[in-house]
Image (spheres, helix red, strand yellow):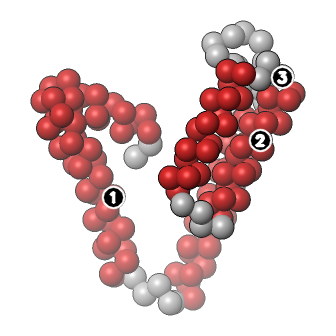
Amino acid sequence: PGPNLVNLIVYIGYDTLSWVGMIVGLIALSIPGTLVALFINEAVNLNNSHVKWLFQGFSLASVILFLVFLRGLMRGLKTNGEKQAASVFKLVFRLFIATATGVASFYHLPLLYILVVGAILGLFSEYFIP
C-alpha cells in the first residue's frame, strides 16, 4: 500500500482505538501483501527461466514508473503551495536527489540512511532553495 493509505489507516486506527488501533490497523494492512509474497516465494520456482523473465519485466516496469515520476518532477512541480513553477536549479536538485536515491538503493546502502539523507536534502531543497 502507498503512504497515503498507510497514513489514513494509522490515523483512523489511532482516532478510534488509540495506539492499539493504530498498531492493529497497520498490521492488518501489511498482512495480506506479506502472505501473498510468502506464497509466491514458496509456490513458484524462482530458478525457472520464464519466471526470471517475468521478474525482469517487473524490474523494467519499475524503472519505467520511476522515469514517469521523474518526468512529472521535471515538469515543474509547484513549491510550498505557491502558484509559480519551481526554479531550474530546484528542478535539477530534485533530479539529483531522485537519482542519488536510486543509485544508493541499487548499491544496497542501508535504507534508513537513504531515507534520512533523502528527507534532509528534500526538505532543504523545498525550503531553502529559491
Q: Is residue 61 visible?
A: no
Residue visible at 79% across and 28% down? Answer: 90
Image height check: is 58 above or below 78? below
Look at mark 3 in the image and give the residue it sits on. 87
Q: Nearer the viewer, mark 2 or mark 1?
A: 2
Residue visible at 68% across and 25% down? Answer: 126
**Quadrant position of the C terminus in the picture:** top right
Whether tag 3 and tag 2 are in contact, CB under 8 A, the answer is no
Image-based side of 7 in relation to 125, left or right: left
Look at mark 2 in the image and give the residue it sits on. 95
Residue visible at 63% across and 13% down? Answer: 81
Q: In the displayed image of the protein, which residue is found farthest to the right? A: 88
Q: CA distance from mark 3 to mark 1?
A: 39 Å
User: Looking at the picture, which amino acid does disc 1 mark?
Assistant: Gly
**Helix, strand or loop at disc 3?**
loop
Look at mark 1 in the image and give the residue it sits on. 33
User: Looking at the picture, which amino acid does disc 2 mark?
Assistant: Leu
Residue visible at 77% across and 12% down? Answer: 84
Q: Nearer the viewer, mark 3 or mark 1?
A: 3
Q: x and y percent of residue 114 in the render?
A: 59, 51
Q: x and y percent of residue 29 in the render?
A: 28, 47
Tell me where residue 88 sits by quadrant: top right
Nearer the N terminus, badge 2 or badge 1?
A: 1
Nearer the N terminus, badge 3 or badge 2?
A: 3
Whether tag 2 and tag 1 are in contact, CB under 8 A, the answer is no
Q: Residues within 10 Å of mark 2 (few under 14, many from 20)?
A: some
Image height check: is 79 above or below 34? above
Q: x and y percent of residue 69 in the render?
A: 68, 42
Q: In the displayed image of the protein, which residue is found farthest to the top? A: 83
Nearer the N terminus, badge 3 or badge 1?
A: 1
